[in-house]
Amino acid sequence: MKKFLFTFIMILMFLPTLSLQAANNSIIVKLNGDVLSFDQPPIIDSGRTLLPIRAIFEELGATVTWDSKTQTAIGEKDGKKVILKLNDKNAQIDGKPVTLDVPVKMISNRTFAPARFVAESFGAIVNWDSSTKVMNISFATDETVLYPIRENGKWGYIDKSGKIVVEPTYSDAKLFKYGVGAVLMKDDLGERWGLIDKTGKVVLDLAYDSIEVSTEHFYKLKLKTNWGFYNVYSHKVITPIYSLVMDFCEGMAAVYSSSSNKGYINRSGNEIIPIFYTSRSLSNFSEGVVYLEVEKEHYYTYTKLIVDQQNKTLIDFDKLGLVPLSDEFHDGLFPVLIPDKDKVNGQVGFINKSGNIVKKVDYFTTINGHLDYKNGFAEIENTNPSDYTTLYGFIDTTGRVLEPKYDEVRSFSDGMAMVMIDADKTDYSVSSNKWGFIDSSGKGVIEPQYAEVSDFVNGFASYRKFTSGLWGQTAEGFIDKTGKEILPPTYASIESFSKDGFAVVLLRPDIITNEYGLIDKTGKIIVEPKYDEMQYYENGLARAKLDEKYIYFDTTGKVIWSEK
């Protein structure tokens, strides 16, 4: 009886801790659509989501200080001050008392605070989706786009109406992104890049050798030979110490200290997956996890793993006796090969994040096979052993197979995939190749009939047909997803259509000049094809260049600014 009472008391003592630790680590927190990552995962306490206090303050762009004597955290942003005290439900916003639903807590040597309270204190809107366990935090951000112009050899910016809003004083300038623009100053100190806002105020010092726009509200920074990042939200610089950095994906970015030593950092610049040795390039995080190949003690052999954003190993493929066929999860599934007895071939299966096989597919491949999934589909092939001819098809992320029956296929784009039938296999030139399209059901929506086609983008694809013209081909026209010809072959090339329905076209290239213009999705000419360069910015303006001078057009073809 005494033993029972002791056990029962111990369980009661640990119930709060067990409740916290049992919280679902699959909670996803997004800030204006960007996935955030933390060195400790979010927890749920009494129905409230708690996050590491310093990390969430910094992600919201607030400075944070910690008073160890009073066990108090102070966050400040844009004149707003939020005060939180450890193990206390009483908080303050600008000196006014506020009562929290749950107190600030210390867990795994990290101070956690209610995420909703902290975010809303700084004016954010918070939405919680209990079905997907996704918390969306959003600010009314300034996504103003300004356009670079040049006057008298100096660069500044205009707005969408053509009004100069930043006077031309810089040596170079790039298109605005995330409400800021990269500018270059050349003087006696050398060449220095920085960032300015829409008022022309410098928000990142002109001190860098290069600045490139990246993903998830980041810019890449280069200083001498090293790369780092600038977080537009928090204004935090991740010091350039890496030989190479990749774009952020789901709040994590691959970084390289050399060609063989790599790791991952989070949005605060912390190395969540420390630098390790591998001769392989690193994959992007997908659905909160990443595929890694870590070198074993002896060279050129690798342990293949699935690791989460806290560097916890979820799957060890060697221990499971499975061969990975991809480097990303899709819809909670990952394709693997279940080897045969001779470990030469095997059957395709799909595992979940626990490493359990949840589906097998009536499709076989070799141990060296790889399924490169793009937009939900990967190419598969079927070789006839009697004549060694190979036909191609697709498999989706659930294991559904689209029959291999084409001589060549290309990845899905905009719900359609290019497929080719060689009409005369004795003709080794491309003249017998006929291209068409299938949709995601495998149905041949547009029968193979074209000499060349482009991917569908925003509902349209360009095409060519063979004739006796230049190189045996006419110029390009474009079709919609039903195969309807919107524009007959007219231009030498047509770039992909933007979301708002415009495409840059090239009328007639020659050795000396190009003739670029702009059309809409009906084929109507918006800007006459006669310019040396043309770029459409997908937010209402196109920039052309003629005789070394720049010109801006709106979507009606009206000139709104021209270099003198």
Image: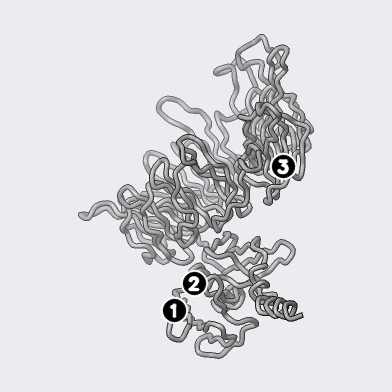
Q: Secondary structure at mark 1?
A: strand
Q: Percent position (x, y) of residue 177?
A: 48, 56
**Mark number displayed over residue 66:** 1
**Neighbour class for label 3 at 10 Å: few (<14), some, many (≥20)?**
many
Which residue is at the front of the view, 315 or 475? 315
Callout 3 touching callout 1 (CB < 8 Å): no
- Looking at the image, which residue is at 61% across and 29% down? 368
Q: Separation of disc 1 and disc 2 at Cα? A: 9 Å
Q: Quadrant of residue 492?
A: top right
**Neighbour class for label 2 at 10 Å: few (<14), some, many (≥20)?**
many
Q: Percent position (x, y) of residue 288?
A: 61, 55
Q: Secondary structure at mark 3?
A: strand
Residue marked by disc 2: 54
- Relative to 66, is 155 above or below? above
Which residue is at the front of the view, 268 or 302? 302
Q: Secondary structure at mark 2?
A: helix
Q: Disc 2 marks which amino acid?
A: Arg
- Relative to 233, is 240 above or below? above
Q: Separation of disc 3 and disc 2 at Cα? A: 39 Å
Which part of the image, by quadrant, shows the N terminus? bottom right
Residue marked by disc 3: 350
Q: Earlier in the sequence, mark 3 or mark 2?
A: 2
Direction from residue 54 to residue 409 in the image, left or right: right
Q: Separation of disc 3 and disc 1 at Cα? A: 47 Å
Q: Disc 3 marks which amino acid?
A: Phe
Q: Nearer the viewer, mark 3 or mark 2?
A: 3
| Residue sitting farthest toward the top | 426
